[in-house]
Image (spheres, rainbow, N blue to C red):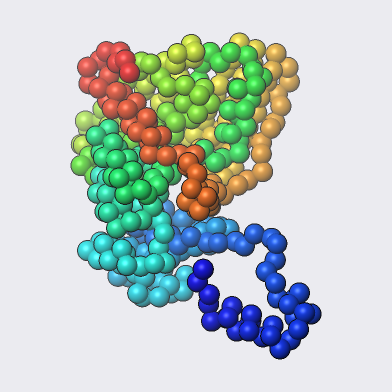
Amino acid sequence: MRISRRTFLASSALVVSGPRALAQTLPSTQPTTRKLGWAVVGLGSLSRGQLLPALAKTTHSRLAAVVTGSPEKDRAVARQYKLDASHCYSYETFDRMRDDADVDVVYIVLPNSMHAEYTLRAATIGKHVFCEKPMAVSVAECRQMIEACAAAKRKLSIAYRMLYEPNLIEARRLCRDGAIGKVTSITSVFGFNIGAFGGWRLNRKMSGGGPLMDIGIYSINAARFVTGEEPTEVTAKIQAAPDDARFKEVEAAMDFTLKFPGGALATCRTAYNASLGTSLRITGERGWINLTPAFMYGGNLLSCSRDGGAVEWLTKPYVNGFAAEIDDFSQCVMDDKPSRTPGEEGLRDMLVIEALYRAAAEGNVVRL
């Protein structure tokens, strides 16, 4: 056991202070709170607006380093979060984190096409990996990421914030407990009108696709989550917008269906050209569950009706999903336990996404 100078001096004082001092300085029987060091890779709006503030509110995690290509962002974040310049890296110096003992976990918050590269690099330098969704831009890349982290004996988890959202968790519990009977259908939408300068999200090479990859994945993941099943077949139809310069490379919108082995059919729509909002409705043989909004950072609402009865408002207290998922992964690393959202979870969504794009291209049902 490593003994710090402070611990050594405190224990040495017992020799001259006697039993009373011993009783006062013995360690508490309460478990100590350890904080793992996180390096945030990419300082875009999500990182600066949500993730860094969330990290500051966690119990088991702390900001230990940042990686960015912008010296201005680097300096601003370092000042705000009192981060020493020695823990500020560029993409070129990323691999030097191998020797940074303060960094335990690398959180990849980069364009989708960069997820696989930086996961592999993080595993190579011996760091655990927490990666934004979608996990990657192909099934093949997802599998490479899982294999690389397994080979390095490092944990890999995907940032599915909604799986820590109390209202979605409660909706799943209601489904599992049979509150509305057998689930027969799920309807979900998520769409907004993206700006003319949507950045990398409108670049197929960087994003891997349009709204399906970015926000349609919420509907896919939620349907899988509440049913506890994997879809067996899918259909999809892409809405093109040939006269809209925003959508030269990616789809403007997509309508799609997921059929589950238990009989439920999920009907979904995602869009970058319409303000659809976010919603999830689960219908069963004896009632329904409704989340509207469903996938926002806060303000999600949950209601339910059973056996034709009155509407019950079951909305749960707000939880910061970013802080919850970050702390959960830190505990998984410290306790060496499986993550709630491992790489395999991201792979399963990507299998569905690839099938949906294939179904849209072929105009046929695609079986998984």
Query: Which residue ends up furthest to the right in the rendered image?
Result: 20
Quarter of the image for residue 147 reads top left
Quarter of the image for residue 316 reads top right
Q: Is residue 10 visible?
A: yes
Expressed as whole percent of the image width and height from the top left, the position of residue 27 reads: 67, 69
In this rendering, the answer to whether 36 lies above or below 170 is below
Q: Residue at x 35, y 33 (%)?
A: 347
Total label count? Answer: 0
Quadrant of image for the C terminus: top left
Q: Residue at x 30, y 32 (%)?
A: 252
Q: Is residue 187 visible?
A: no
In this rendering, the answer to whether 159 lies above or below 122 is above
Left or right, residue 3 beside residue 46: right
Left or right, residue 168 beside residue 78: right
Expressed as whole percent of the image width and height from the top left, the position of residue 157 reads: 41, 44
Left or right, residue 99 beside residue 35: left
In this rendering, the answer to whether 82 lies above or below 90 is below
Of 11 and 215, nearer the camera is 11
Expressed as whole percent of the image width and height from the top left, the position of residue 156 reads: 39, 45
Expressed as whole percent of the image width and height from the top left, the position of residue 180 reads: 64, 17
Q: Residue at x 27, y 66 (%)?
A: 96
Of 301 and 160, nearer the camera is 160
Query: Which residue ends up furthest to the bottom in the rendered image?
Result: 16
Quarter of the image for residue 30 reads bottom right
Q: Residue at x 55, y 58 (%)?
A: 60
